[in-house]
Image (cartoon, rainbow, N blue to C red):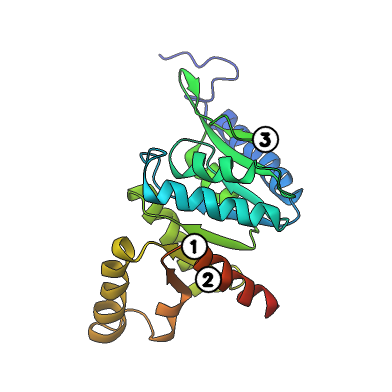
Amino acid sequence: MKTVKKFDYKNNAAWRMFRIMGEFTDGFEFISSLKKPVTIFGSARFSPKNKWYKEAEKLAMILSKKGFDVVTGGGPGIMEAANKGASYDGKGDSVGLNIMLPNEQRINPHVKRSAAFHYFFTRKVCMSFSAKAYIYFPGGFGTLDELFELVTLVQTEKIERVPIVVIGKDFWEPLMKFISTKMANQYQTISSSEKNIIKIVDSAEEAYKYLTREFRKK
């Protein structure tokens, strides 16, 4: 018979639930302390030479100077770019919600305030909690997962409607075309208005102009 050790989060379901509850409690408390959070998502694989790395850094710098707290997953790529931009003498914080891996804590050096998570799903929920806007740069499966979860929450009115912006027309336009022509028009799996939950732009400046207009409506 297998012996379960005390505080064995891996094999003891009861202790695992306590750990999950603790991560949610600490995570929500941490995020709630931010005054004007904007969450930025995107690929962890982009280098500083990449066009979208540079645009993410630029947008984060603009947002931080305007007093917004820039929130990322705390890792490399787009996350690093956003935290780097936010750390340039801005009025807002450079925040990272990072994931703890077995042999390391994957966090970039530009994060000023951070919270660490053991579970990916608790981290994702906290990254999707109470931001003023959500920004998505080109990315992989994780970025798409995070995008569509937010869109679904808005669609089903589980959260209030907030700006959801995807940046990079060359990357996002094929997906937006699929949503419009296949999902909304041909198969009608979503309503025509629901395709407008996502706003597509092509630069940091264009994204900020759109956010400014949306914030003025509130």
Q: Does residue 11 appear left or right of residue 170 in this picture?
A: right
Q: Secondary structure at mark 3?
A: loop
Q: For residue 85, which quarter of the picture? A: top right
Residue 35 seen in this snapshot:
yes
- Which tag, 3 or 1, sits closer to the chain's start? 3
Q: Does residue 161 appear left or right of residue 139 in this picture?
A: right
Query: Which percent across, then down, holds residue 2?
Result: 42, 15
User: Which residue is painted at 33% across and 49% down in the image?
Assistant: 141
Q: Give me the disc on residue 112.
A: 3
Q: Secondary structure at mark 1?
A: helix
Q: Nearer the viewer, mark 3 or mark 1?
A: 3
User: Which residue is painted at 52% across and 42% down in the image?
Assistant: 73
Residue annotated with mark 1 = 150
Q: Whole-Å distance between the Cαs marked 3 and 1?
A: 26 Å
Q: Whole-Å distance between the Cαs marked 3 and 2?
A: 30 Å
Q: Whole-Å distance between the Cαs marked 1 and 2?
A: 6 Å
Q: What amino acid type is highlighted by mark number 3?
A: Lys
Q: Give me the disc on residue 92.
A: none
Q: For residue 109, which quarter of the picture? A: top right
Q: What amino acid type is highlighted by mark number 1?
A: Leu
Depth order, front residue of 32/60: 60
- Which tag, 3 or 2, sits closer to the chain's start? 3
Query: Which percent across, then down, holds residue 39?
Result: 57, 53
Q: What amino acid type is highlighted by mark number 2?
A: Val
Residue annotated with mark 2 = 154
Mark 3, residues whose alpha carbon is within 10 Å: few (<14), some, or many (≥20)?
A: some
Quadrant holding the N terminus: top left
Mark 1, residues whose alpha carbon is within 10 Å: few (<14), some, or many (≥20)?
A: many
Quadrant holding the C terminus: bottom right
Q: Nearer the viewer, mark 3 or mark 2?
A: 3
Callouts 1 and 2 close, C-beta under 8 Å: yes
